Amino acid sequence: MQFVDEARIFCQGGNGGSGCVSFRREKFVPRGGPDGGDGGKGGNVLLLAKTELSTLLDLRYQQHYKAQNGAHGRGNKQHGKKGQDLVIPVPVGTVIKDADTGEILKDLVAEGETFLAARGGQGGRGNASFVSSLHQTPRTAEHGEKGQACWRMLEFKLLADVGLVGHPNAGKSTLLSNVSAARPKIASYPFTTLAPHLGVVSYGEFKSFIMADIPGLIGGAHAGAGLGSKFLCHIERTRLLVHLVDVSGDLRGDSWSQYETISHELGLFNPSLLEKPQLVVLNKIDLPEVRNAIPQVKRSFEDKGIDLYVISALTGEGVSELVEEIGRRSENIGDAISG
């Protein structure tokens, strides 16, 4: 399935039904009087958060949505039927913005949450509603109101406890596939992962957390380089970042610069990302040259006050200990639903 995390849709509330001008004229019913009913209210356009959805793809193909109009009033004081609401399902984690101003209107972060995207118009009053002691035979009725019409911008942000970040081909997808049932594409070339993947990771006794594999980042990502800022927004909701460092392709001591590059891009995109708890992990120690470089690389990080975890996502060495540490830390971190 194609991953789409942004969509722009036009929402049109249903028009209200018009009121009716009618007089009761029946044999043996003296002075029947006005009996025109009111028009029905137009239906609303609602956005409904659903956990089973994971993309806004459907909204790319259909952009215009209109709720049902309210029915007109009729004689014998029969009020028009209310227009049916139009409910549009969206993934949990969808942020709704005003397309013109960019103002955030709602953040749907729980199953079943709704947002009124476009309000239906009120129905017009029939002439029976205008009867008064001074006006016994009103011959006027109101037209129904037009439904609200507006463009809404939808942005989907993944909801995960842990976000995997790092350079392309650092082993994030391999790690996720080995600790969960997720099956992201894995290959030996950069930018294999073209969309975020979620996996449920079990640890301890009946405990679990959700891990997200964020596609590889490079220098300039905040400005759109590589896969750019397209997926950086998904990191904003995570509780904990796991930064994978891969020095298998270049063992000249530049692992720290790799780490700094990614951290710099996170800070440029959103400075609050640098305040998130983080674990730094050296991957691919199944390779002899990486294993030999571990003491030097660890010293370069420890000199900066950062502890380095060492694993092989491919063989599983050190992975169970890392998962336990991630679980322990995520338990002690408050809710990170933001951004």
Image: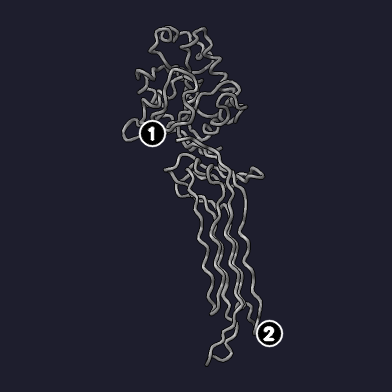
Drawn side of residue 101 relative to residue 81, left or right:
right
Specify few, some or many for label 2: CA neighbours under 10 Å numbering under 14, 14-19, or 20 or more: few
Residue at the (53%, 91%) spot, across then down: 27
Q: Are marks 2 and 1 in contact (CB under 8 Å)?
A: no
Q: Residue furthest left?
A: 205
Quadrant of image for the N terminus: top left
Label for residue 134? Answer: 2
Q: Nearer the viewer, residue 86 or 62?
A: 62
Is the residue 168 above or below the residue 79 in the image? above
- Image x and y of residue 219, in percent: 59, 20
- Image x and y of residue 102, in percent: 64, 42
In terms of image quadrants, where is residue 261? top right
Q: Amino acid at mark 2?
A: Leu
Q: Nearer the viewer, residue 203 or 24?
A: 24
Label for residue 200? Answer: 1
Is the residue 77 above or below the residue 143 in the image? below
In terms of image quadrants, where is residue 32? bottom right
Drawn side of residue 298 relative to residue 15, left or right:
left
* C-alpha separation, residue under disc 2 versus residue under disc 1: 71 Å
Drawn side of residue 22 relative to residue 300, left or right:
right
Label 2, secondary structure: give it.
loop
